[in-house]
Every structure is written in structure tokens, then in C-alpha cells.
Image (spheres, coloured by chain):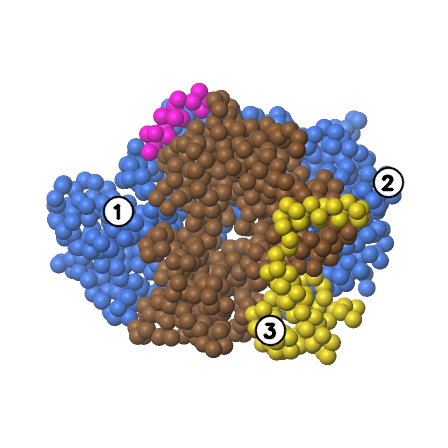
Chain colours: A brown, B blue, C yellow
Amino acid sequence: MSDIEKIEVDTLVVGSGIAGLQSALDLADQGYSVAIVEKAPSIGGKMISLSKVFPTLDCASCITTPRMASVSHHPRITTLTYSTVDAIKREGKSFTASVTRKPRYIDEKECISCKRCEEVCPVYLPDEYEQGMGAKKTISIPFTNAIPQYPVMHPEHCIRCGACARACPKDCIEFLQEPAPVEIKAKSVILATGYETTPMTAKKQYGLGKLPNVISPMAAERLLAPHGPYGRVLRPSDGMVPGSIAYVQCAGSRDKSIGVPYCSRVCCMYAIKQAILLSGSLPIADITIYYMDIRAFGKGYEQFYNNARAMGINFVKAKVARITEDEKHNPILRIERQEGDSAPAEVQHELVVLSQGLVPGHDAAAFGLGAENNDYGFVKLSDEMVSSAVTAGAGVFAAGVVKGPRDIPDSVVDAGSAAMEAASYMRKL
Amino acid sequence: MDEKTRDEAAKDNFRQEPKVGVYVCHCGGNISDIIDVKAVAAALARYPGVAVAREYAFMCSSNGQDLIAEDIKNLGVNRTVVAACSPSLHELTFRNVLQRAGVNPYLHEHINIREQASWVHKFDKAGATAKAIKLAQAGVEKVLRKDALNAIRVAAEQRVAVIGGGAAGMRAALSAAGKGLEAVIIEKGPALGGKLLELGRLYPSGEEGAAVAGKLEALVRADSRITVHTAVDIDFVSGFVGNFKINFKKADGRSEQVKAGAIVMATGYEHYKPAKGEFGYGEDANVVTLPEFIALMKNSPAGRLALAGKEIKSLALIHCVGSRQVEGVHKPQADGKINDYCSRVCCTAALHTVNQLKDKYPGVRVYDIYRDIRTYGMQHEEYYDKASKDGVLFMRHNEADQPVVASDRTGHTVKVKDVLTWGEELEVKADLVVLVTGMMPADISLIKSQLKLPSSADRFLQEVHLKLRPVELANSGIFVAGTAQYPMDVTEAMAAAGTAAAKAAILLAEPDIPLEPFVAVVDEHKCTGCGLCPPECSYDGALMMGEHNGKKVAVVNPALCKGCGACVAVCPVRAINVAGWTLDQFDAMVDAIAKE
Amino acid sequence: MADAKKLAEQLKRLNELRGPVPQELRDRVAAQNKAQKAILDALKEGPKTAPELAAAAGLPHDLAIWYVAGLRKYGKISDVPGRGDWPKYELKAGEAK
């Protein structure tokens, strides 16, 4: 290995979801240089894997891919994907980040993204991009719209047959590639590490991961996406077109028993959106949303909710106590209605989506830069009444869901103000 | 864009033999589920002038863009037609592709086969496909007749005018000044702070609104780049991106003008004012709005909540007053529309207030009558929790079963059909009824009409696109911050205002601003100087009669012209055209569509 | 194209560094190949639904639909157009002959 790769920029952005991308663009368009570090093999974050987005029903790709392309083409933005930020040190008025480029086991300079390695690879794996419902290969390009379009090899699933290397027209498979350290020097840092959905291990009574037809909302997004795992909406237990689909709201939010007492802000709206999309692709299906309060509070959201009701989607005020299944893997919900008949009832559906909430994607305080977390692990602002991005760490700013759940419009708006705070800070350095 | 690519792109591709590349986008399935995109591409591939026609899942993705760039490089494509979504979404994306590939970006035509074909002809797949083909063919005819245009560049004032000195306005000015721009706050009220000054303690910090205003104001006053004008009346706003002029009258009667390259609209909101008789409001002194109640609580002595000397021992809150209104249930507002939107902040504000009430006057009985509790923010749920623990009684009604307030000498009776008790008709006695009122946009009709600013159905200012351009108005150089756009709380207004300032800073990052070249162009040889066109022009000074080589002709000011085409329509000799949208192009497009 | 000798050396070095390919992985790939072959063989008789393929290949239903998704993605099989609760799949022309 030769010397450590060194990059010097104005701002380091950690995370390349919609908030990270937007703050990088808003800085670079003002003339600042930016480095984005993303742990996944592609930029785009969670948003790129969504189907369509509320309340406009634009396809998520139509909104995300152009931004991804702008970032990757921007002369002032350097993007490091499949890379981890191991540590960030404050040195005087600047920061030095130790980053590791994880090996893709290919020569990125030579790769022409022809996909031949993937075509010939004989080992099929569950594709996490499709939430496990589809397949990828031991060496594969992460997904159609990924940027960059480099394949990634998973050596733990490699049978070392050498087929990929023989098929590669550029001879760029490197079985022995090692992780490569990179040092990024920056004047400011924007944390945009986003979220994960609530882990459902604490909510065993809902059966996620145990019952095959109780799925996550991210899986539902993939079922609805144009290039999803089955190319249409089918249930994962047996490939049947579901005729009756239910949403369980607040399955992982507003729930002290699992340590997530807050509202995750997006679940009502994504459930309504998915319900609208489902009724488009499955016109005869029954769709029911079991909810406590519908929180359609953003611009155009209430009207979106009203449209869903007019389309015949059933909204039922009820608590779901637990979910089991029958011998055909049809989920059975035990519900307590809050209106009409009060007696507990058991209702059978063919597919159930648990509207999981949002929890922090990364412990941003662990970087030790002075930015602190709130009680739930999201980054705390130093005074949210006067700025939406300034943390307790000088030169460290936060954009998007790293500060707490927010939807895409709110995250996009948020990102610009983070960029602006970073710009103001750097001008005064 | 660096100088070199700009020059490259400016090269006149017009002289080259036109080679059109046509790109049909699936838009995921938005288009391809209805339209046979392969058939569209095949039909276009055979069309005269077309060198190549392709279809792809997402033309706007990096891969899709690369397809075009490679055809430019390898096949010599020098004009493009992309048949995809609305041009408002992605025309710019593809112009940039051409620019990067060294082709003049205006030799691109964006055809909308989503909104104009697949979405509107869902049940006629063959018809939608045929229409998409026709539209794309018309696009080819148009692009074949396009000139290599160049953006018009105008010098920009390096100054941001912020209209409104509330929370959002102050933050926008601070962020713009932080970046090094000059900022001018123009506020009609006597002091900075806006609505903050009227509110009591604010969530989530619990500070008094005036204290938050004070913190922001201190920062504003400390920044030498920010000028503040308070107690002024704006009487005339004019100009265009880079060169806006805001004229206002000061309290002493003197007039002043601020020149600015960008405007941030931070004009805020008004509390919804219930109609007379709405839940007894205006007819009974013991029916108040939430802001009125906050003032009342502030002025009540410790240990005794009192209104006009009479102790209040119980109160009923009614949510969603002036928000989430339903056709047929609620009376329309003065403009004939109902307020069907959720005002976002009122649930949390109400419960935050109830928390304070219960802390100060634990003995007061509180009934909370709601449809959905929307305490969505990080700590908001705690207010809801505390209210429940404090013994607040929640009652929930459906939209069609509105609560009814009846008043007599003993106080008020609120009737609710409560779904929490499975539809039982409940009657609660309350000394005071508090209407949890929502937000309406502040009255900015003068500025809106002078600058022709767009509003959405909810009457708030309308952004270009909620996710792509969330704080930009369709009017270039004008941004929106805070509750002028939609109800939001202070923390959210901080984000919106910071971003509005960011967009202004990006716009003003260079001393001159590129404007779209789609402006009226006069052919001086054809122009007879008849003078019919200037009266049609709606943009002051954009089109006037002047002289060219001693001949009286119409003269266009490209910086002011919006390319509306009103002048084109009245010219008897076809001497005026809008660049990029010429009459010849329209003729050819119509011919292409009408052809059998 | 990779140089055969260089490739052999790399793979040998890999075995030295990481030890042999685990038996569990070999077994998994063998089972995968068997299942995929059974699905493709069953489809030679004509279009089938996921449960029909599961029965023909002796696979649990959820695993059958996962293989179907993979074979579909990599161009071995395709959807048969039509409606109904159980979509059918067919061999792609020229595949699995």
C-alpha cells in the first residue's frame, strides 16, 4: 500500500441521503468544496429505494436520481461511497476524519460497469436492497440507479470459482484487495446520518421476521417500486396477489415499552401513500389502516388523506394487540376498536404492513466533536429556537433525520439551512 | 459551469446538420405502465431528422443521462427530445446534460408524456401511446427549428430584501448576512418579532415568545450587514431577479427604496378569526380563541383563573377551529373556500398551554375535544402524556359530528358525540370555551399582485415543488420563508428561513445572474412600427417603441420581458417571436400533430 | 480478460489467507443449483404459478418465490401476462434449454 489518500475540502458531509446530498449541493453551489462519505455502496440513502413519495406521488427516483447525478457530476464535490468514517479529530480550527474505503474487490478506475461479472457469478444471495425478497449475486451492482455503478463483491459468499475474473473485459477483479485508509481534512462537518426503522425485536407480539406475510414498510416500498423484486405486488410467503392488506400504525412509535415514546412523523403519511398506490395496482383489494390518530400535518397532507378516504381505503380507529397467522400464513390481527363495536375482535388479512417508526441511524455524538444527543439518541441542537442546524460542537452541524424524524420535504428544507450555517461559520473562521 | 464549457456550449450548433436524439422515459412505471414506450421509440426512430431513439427506465438518472451524453459523443447527436415528465421537473436536468456534453443547452426539447398522456389517458393505452408519438414528433419538429440560444446575463444587486421581521424574517436575514450578503428587513409593525411578541411561552423550549424574538433581534442588531426598517408600509414592489425595487413609506411619511437581488417573503400568518357565532364566538364573552386564552392566562392572578372578574373552574377546548374543514359541514370563508388544511401547530400549542394551565391552576377541569391529536414533534408527545396524567378529559368526534356549544346564564354546555365512548352523546359544562384556532396567511395581496406571486389552494404562497425546490416561488429570485408558506412552528421556521437564505446566496454567488433567453425578439426588417404591441405588454418597460436605423420599431428589454407572447399575438406582420417558441415552430408542431 | 495463471495464483493465495471455501457455503450453492434446475425443468412443461413450482421442486413456498424472483431478475424466466391471484411464470425464450 502506498501513502494514505488525502483529501482537503471546506466541508465534510457524513451521509448521502437526501439531506446529505442537498446540503452538499447547497454548499457546493455557493462555491465551497465538499466531501461526502457514505457507508453504503451507492449514494442516495433511504429515499432512493422508495417507490413514490407523498403528497405529490412523484416517483422517488425522479426526485432523487437527478440530485445524485448533480452531486456526482459536481466539480466541487468528492464522493466516497462504501466508506466508513472511523473517527473525526478536531485540530485547531479544522477537522481531520479517518475514513476507510471498504474493498469492493474490483479496480474502480478500470471498471466500465458492464455487469458481466454479475451475470456469470453462480451464487445467489438475498438482496438487502429488496429487503431480502429479491436476489443478488456474490458480486453485483447494488441496484439499477446506484451511483457509482460499481459492483461489490461479498467474499464471505464467494466460492472462488473465478468466473467473474474470466468474464471481466477490463481485468479488474481484485480478489486480494484491502481496505484503503483516506484522510479528509475539512473546516466544518455536517452530520446527515439519517435513520433506521424501529427494530421490531422488542415488539415480538407483531411477528415481524417470524410471520412471512407481516412485512416492513420498506419491503412494501419495494413491492410497489417499478423494478421491485417481483415486478408487481405479491406477498412473500407464496407469491400470491394479496386481496386484503392491513397497516398497523404506530408499530414502533408512541410506544414507551420499546423506548420510542415519540411520534415518528412519517408513518401516517407513508401508510396512506402506500395504500393509495396499492389500490392503484390492486384495484379490487381491501385496504385497511388501523390507527390511533392520523397525523397529516404537512402542506397538502390533509387533502391527501381525504383523497385516500374517498378512494375507499378503510381507516379504522383501533389498537392492534398482537398478530398471529393461520395455516395459510394469513396474518390474524387481534384488535380493539375505538369506535363502533368495542369488543376485541380477530380480523384476518392476507398481508400486513407494520408502520415502523424511525430511530437514529448512527450515534453521531460518538464522534466526540461536542455535538450531543437527546434522550433518544438524535443529535441535539444548541438552541433550536434560533437555528435549526447548530450543534454544541463548534463547526459541527446537523441536517435531516439525524436530529429527529422528519419527512422528505422537511429534510430537504432542513438541509439548506445546515449548509447555510456551515457557510456562515466558515466565513468567520 | 466554468468558462470553457460555457463557450463550448455556446457554439452555434445550428449550422451543423441536425441530428436529433429522442429519449423516451418509462418514469418507473408512471409512463410505461400505460404507454408502449418501445413503440414510441420505434416510431420516432423512423421519423425524419431523428438519428437515434431510445427508451429507458429513468432518463433522469445518472445512467439515463449518460445514454444521451454518449450519443452526443459517439453518434454526433446535436439536438435532443426527451419525452418524459413535466418540463418543470426535469427540463433543466437534461439541458445540463447537453451543456456538459458540449452542445448548446437550448437545443433540447422536453415533451411531457406523463401528465399529458399516461396519467390522463389511463384507460386508453393505445390512445395514450398514439398521443405520445404525436407529441414527441411535434417535439422533433420544434427542436429542428431551434436556435442555439444563450442565457441573458444581468448584473445583480448583492443584497437580499427580507419582507417581514418575525422569526423567519430575522433568521433569513441572519443567514444571508452570515454568508456575507447585505440584508434588509422590511417590517410593517413597530418592532421586530412579529407574532412571537403576542405569544406566551413557546414549545419546545418553554421560553416566552418575546424572549425568543429578543434573542434573534440581538443577533440581527449585532450584524452590521443587516439594515432594519420597522413601521413601514410597502407601497410598490417592482423589478426582476437581480434587480428588485421595494418602495415603502416610513412612519414619518418619507419614502424610501431598497434595491435587492433577491427577495425573501417572510410575511407570516394571522390567527384564524372564528366567524360570529362559530361555536358561540363573538356572541358570548366566554368563548375565546387559544391566543386570547393565552393572554388571559398570563393576566390571571396566581391561584385563580379569572375572566372579567369571574373565576373559571372548567374549560373545554375545541380543536381544528378554522382548520381541517369539511365541505358541507363548515361554512366557507369570505373567498368561498373552506380551510381544508391542517394548521399543524395547534394540537401541540393547545396541549402545551393546557400543561401550563394545569401547573398554574391544577384545580381547573379541562375537557379536550378533538378529531386527531397531532403532536408529531420530538417532545410533543410528552405534552399529550402530561395532559392525560393531569386529568384532562379527552373526547373525540368524527368530522361530520361537530361539537355544539350552547350557552346560558350558568355557563356553556358542549355536546359531543364521543367515539372514545363508542359514540355516546356527552354533555359537558364549562365556564369557558377555548377555540383552538389555526393559521391563515397574512394579507399580502398588494405585494402578491404587484409581483404576481402564486398561491396554493390553501392561500399560502406556493413553492415550485415541495421536494425539488421547496422554498422557491415560480418567480425567479423570490423565496419564501416560514408561515407565509404553510403553518409551522418556530423551529421549523428556522430551517425554512435558513434554506431560503441559502437559495438566495446561491443565486447571488456570482455578480451576474443568467436569465432564460425565452424573450420577445423583434425582426426590425418586418416591423412596421405600427405600435400595436406595447399596449399589450404587461411588464413595465419590457416592450416600447423606439428607433432602429432611423426607423420606428418595437424594442424589447430582454431583462424585463417574461416571454409571455402577448405582443406576438397582436403583430399583424409576424415581426415578433419569442425566442425558442417561434411561430414557425408552432406551425411545424401543429402540422406534425395534425398529419394523418 | 484475466490471465489464467495470474487468476489461479490469486485464488490460491486467497485459499491460503482465508482457508478453504466453507462446506456450508458449498452446500448452499449446491442446493441452490438443484432448486433452480428443478424450477426451470418444471417450466419446460409450460407456465406455472409459484406454489406449483414449489410443489414440483419440493421447496417451501417462500423459498420458491425467492428463487422465482432471482431467476426473473437474471433473465431466466418471465411473467406470463394476465390477472388472477397466482401469477404464472414461463421460461424466457432461449433459456435453460
Q: Position of residue B206 (x, y in %)?
A: 28, 39
Magenta part, dominant SS? helix
Residue B284 position in % (x across, y down): 21, 54
Any part of residue A342 in sight: yes
Mark 3 and mark 1 residues within 8 Å of each other at the beta carbon: no
Q: Residue at x 33, y 29 (%)?
A: B214
Q: Position of residue B62 (x, y in %)?
A: 68, 46
3D distance between C-alphas at marks 3 and 1:
61 Å
Q: Amino acid at mark 2?
A: Gln
Question: In terms of secondary structure, where does tag 2 sit?
Answer: loop
Using residue B215 as the reference point, say whether residue A395 is left or right of it. Answer: right
Q: Residue furthest right?
A: B17
Q: Measuring 53% from the left and 60% from the top, which residue is drawn there?
A: A219
Disc ID at residue B16: 2
Three-letter code for the amino acid on which mark 1 is drawn:
Thr
Left or right, A41 with reference to A413: right
Residue B213 belongs to the span the image colors magenta: yes
Closer to the camera in the image, B437 or B308: B437
Please check whether the numbered discs 2 and 1 fall on a single chain: yes
Q: Which residue is mark 3?
A: C59
Q: Is residue B56 above or below residue A286?
A: above
Check contact, mark 2 vs mark 1: CB within 8 A.
Answer: no
- Pick whichever, B336 or B274, lies toward us: B274
